Image (spheres, helix red, strand yellow):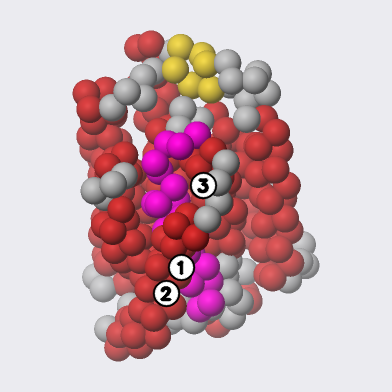
Amino acid sequence: MKFDFTVLLPILIAFGISVALSPMMIPFLKKLKFGQFVRDDGPESHLKKSGTPTMGGLIILCSIVITALFYMKSNPVILPVLFVTLGFGLVGFLDDYIKVVMKRSMGLRAWQKMAGQFITTAVFAYYLANYTDVGTAVLIPFTGGYEWELGFWYYPFLFIVLIGTVNGTNFTDGLDGLLSSITVLTATFFTVIAIGTASGLEPITCAAVGALLGFLVFNVYPAKVFMGDTGSLALGGLIASTAIMLKMPIFIVIVGFVYLFEVISVMIQVVWFKKTGKRVFKMAPIHHHFELCGWPETKVVAIFSIVTAILCLIGLVAY
């Protein structure tokens, strides 16, 4: 496995674009009054965040797209990943636009958001089936490279993986720097695998790492900008589609455990409340539960990031 400057270059390009673009984009978003809507029933400490510019995911998307374009000709395998990233990013952008511009706090209706996600996933699945040799087998962790052939069931599985991961990243984006920090680590994990397998996907995973590191300069506590659904849905699409291209969707359960943990906490909370009228957690998603237990926001982000880093190491062992 050879690591050299050419591997680091897309990280540096995307980082430079992200850092340079943020100081221009943040005042622009403020001027347009694209401010964050904060729930009244959320943690009281979050009320001060109301009005902080959101839709900063546009910074991440621009950084990834511009960087990826430099490598598209030599690494055409990144095209489907870029498509999924942009597709889910568009759904997130529409959701954010309706929330902050049209002042409809819930954004897109549930069926509209799901339709957008379904269409993006369907196009991706069609492309995989007809224009790639990815196949319908997936790698099983801790088996030394054993591939499980799913056949027809691969495509329903693909929908579950993509849409599930995207909604997991969406739920995770609730604290300053949380989703950015976790996704830097998961994108780094898939970069290592992409380089080691000579898959050709490393330019776009490296671009994601660089874009997020640049965005974190302005997104760490106290955040000057939030990524919004524009960023969170796009990042979920990027991670899931990369994992699928590498035949590693099951590995998301390991390295992206925090995403899964966030989704499950919401499901448990909703189901249990409807059944008993009581709550399992003080608030869901789970990161808010820890906040209401007295953890500072920065501690929640740090602990979740440390857990993700350890799980990424376990993921490398599992591979």
Residue receiving disc 2: 16
Residue receiving disc 3: 191
Image side of residue 129 versus residue 290, left or right: left
Image quadrant in which you'd find residue 70: bottom left
- Residue at position x 24%, y 48% in the image: 73
Above or below for 65 versus 220:
above
Above or below for 59 versus 314:
below
Image side of residue 102 versus residue 249, left or right: left
- Residue at position x 36%, y 78% in the image: 21
Residue receiving disc 1: 12
> Of the residues under marks 3 and 1, which one precedes in the sequence?
1
Residue type at mark 3: give it. Thr
Residue 44 location, x and y as percent?
62, 74
Mark 2 falls on what kind of element? helix
| Residue 67 visible in rendering | yes
Above or below for 34 versus 138:
below
Q: Which residues are magenta?
A: 197-218
State yes or no: residue 264 in magenta. Answer: no
| Residue 111 visible in rendering | no
Q: Is 9 in front, or is 177?
A: 9
Residue type at mark 2: give it. Gly
